[in-house]
Image (tube, helix red, strand yellow):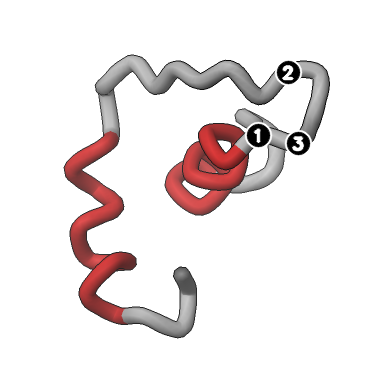
Amino acid sequence: MVDQPELMQSLEELRGKRLGCWCAPKACHGDALVELLDGPSRA
C-alpha cells in the first residue's frame, strides 16, 4: 500500500471510523491500516 500514493492519500478517510474484521487470532489487515494511520503504538 505504501507504494501506491492514491491509496495512501485515501487512507485518511478511515480516521475515526470503526474497522472490523474476523481475522483474529491471525494477523489483521485492520491493524495494519491503523498502524499506517497512527503509528505502531495504536495497532
**What amino acid is at disc 2?**
Ala
* Residue pictured at 51% horizontal, 20% vertical: 21
**Which residue does the numbered mark 3 point to in the structure image?**
27
Residue 26 location, quadrant: top right
Looking at the picture, how far across and down is residue 8, in whole percent?
32, 66
Looking at the rendered structure, the secondary structure element under dot 3 is loop
Determine whether label 1 and label 2 are within 8 Å by CB. Answer: yes
Looking at the rendered structure, the secondary structure element under dot 2 is loop
Does residue 37 lie above or below 18 as drawn?
below
- Counting other residues with Cα less than 10 Å from the Cα at mark 3, is it few (<14), some (14-19), or many (20 or more)? few
**What amino acid is at disc 3?**
Ala
Q: Is residue 19 left or right of residue 10?
A: right
Looking at the picture, how far across and down is residue 3, in whole percent?
46, 83
- Judging depth in this view, the residue of 32 and 15 nearest the camera is 32
Q: Is residue 18 left or right of residue 10?
A: right
Does residue 26 lie above or below 18 as drawn?
below
Label 1 and label 3: CA atoms lie apart by 4 Å
- Counting other residues with Cα less than 10 Å from the Cα at mark 2, is it few (<14), some (14-19), or many (20 or more)? few
Determine whether label 1 and label 3 are within 8 Å by CB. Answer: yes
Looking at the rendered structure, the secondary structure element under dot 1 is loop
* Residue pictured at 59% horizontal, 45% vertical: 32
- Counting other residues with Cα less than 10 Å from the Cα at mark 1, is it few (<14), some (14-19), or many (20 or more)? some
**Which residue does the numbered mark 1 point to in the structure image?**
28
**Which residue does the numbered mark 2 point to in the structure image?**
24
Label 1 and label 2: CA atoms lie apart by 7 Å
Does residue 9 lie above or below 12 as drawn?
below
Quarter containing the C terminus? top right
Looking at the picture, how far across and down is residue 1, in whole percent?
46, 69
Does residue 1 lie above or below 30 as drawn?
below
